[in-house]
Image: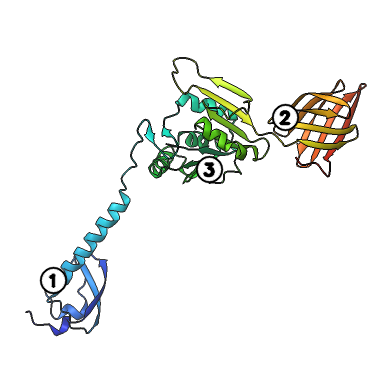
Amino acid sequence: MRQPVRQWDGAVRARTRLLANEAPVHPSLASRYHGPSPMYLVHFSFRREGICLASPARVTRLALLVLTLACHATSAVAQKAPAPEPRLNQPGKDVQWVPTPAALVDKMLDLAQVTRDDRFVDLGSGDGVLVIAAAKRGAKAKGIEYDRGLVELSKQRAADAGVGDKTRFVRGDIFKTDFSDATVVTTFLLPSMNLRLRPTFLAMKPGTRIVANTFAIGDWEPEQTVTLEDPCERWCKAMLWIVPAHVGGVWLTPRGDLTVTQKFQFFSGTLGRDPIENGRLHGEEISFTAGGVSYQGRVEDDRMRVNAIVDGKPVTWTARPAPTSRR
């Protein structure tokens, strides 16, 4: 067993500093160490506990080892392996991964008229292609995706596309994650999943645009449908829905009670004794005909403002829900 050297015994607490080749030797070592100036000088504070370092050279080698290990650890973090590319029909939580054709991506965003004023959300965002495209149009874009690997891949692709600061990708369940503040929502989901999401869509702010790739939302009729021209073989159709205001129930108006039965963006009923025809909602905008008069207006919360031309004169009135009416 080596005998302890008094000058070096003690438990070591070290911090390392990179110095030049001609770095001065620490005063406590000057009388004992006369070799070349070390590249790494280690400063020690000692507490006697019977542990020994045999020489200053060993101190230098220890410092070099510590720095080498630290550099390797830093390099490993900095050189993070890229996320793997998804495979066609790769299984997921609810659906398989299938890429959206680039031409359809543009069509979907055109249908929704995405601008820099929008808050865009893609449900089941996959590799992030729609989110990235929306961000390039200036929108604040977010993707919700359950697959952790696809979330990481999307973040990398957004950064590579120069929109990393305009996008956000979250790992989550689309049926549990809140996206109620979105102004545009896109989906490429199975019909059963769209149908399950329909109550959530209809509860969003009137005017919110929903665009789906290929699959409908039950019997909710889309406002507009576009289909890619040949040579598109699959996933060639995009459909647009606009969340309508809620007007079902009884409204009190100067023309008598306005009784409305609503189904999505369409409605029927009566105004006084006159039946309603062509009742239609486009977000908050409302239009209908009753008693030979065409009405147009806007629904804002619990108030309906309506304009019409009656006997050649402009007429404006405001309707409010009847106290017993549940819309």
Of mark 3 and mark 2, the one earlier in the sequence is 3
**Disc 3 target residue:** 175
Which of labels 3 and 2 is toward the front? 3
Q: Nearer the viewer, residue 128 or 123?
A: 123
Q: Nearer the viewer, residue 78 or 131?
A: 131
The amino acid type, in three-letter code, at marker 2 is Leu
Residue 23 appears in the picture as rendered: no
Which of labels 3 and 1 is toward the front? 3
What is the crowding at mark 1: few (fewer than 14 residues within 10 Å), some, or many (at least 20)? few
Local secondary structure at mark 1? helix
The amino acid type, in three-letter code, at marker 3 is Phe
The amino acid type, in three-letter code, at marker 1 is Ala
The residues tagged by marks 3 and 1 sit, at their Cα atoms, a distance apart of: 63 Å
Residue 281 marker: 2
What is the crowding at mark 2: few (fewer than 14 residues within 10 Å), some, or many (at least 20)? many
**Disc 1 target residue:** 57
Q: Is residue 158 left or right of residue 78?
A: right
| Mark 3 vs 2: CB contact within 8 A | no
Across and down, in percent, residue 166 comes to 51, 42
Q: Quadrant of residue 247?
A: top right
Residue 308 marker: none
Quick one: quadrant of the C terminus? top right
Residue 256 appears in the picture as rendered: yes
Of mark 2 and mark 1, the one earlier in the sequence is 1
The residues tagged by marks 3 and 2 sit, at their Cα atoms, a distance apart of: 27 Å
Across and down, in percent, residue 67 comes to 23, 62
Across and down, in percent, residue 69 comes to 23, 60
Q: Is residue 180 left or right of residue 324?
A: left
Quick one: quadrant of the N terminus? bottom left
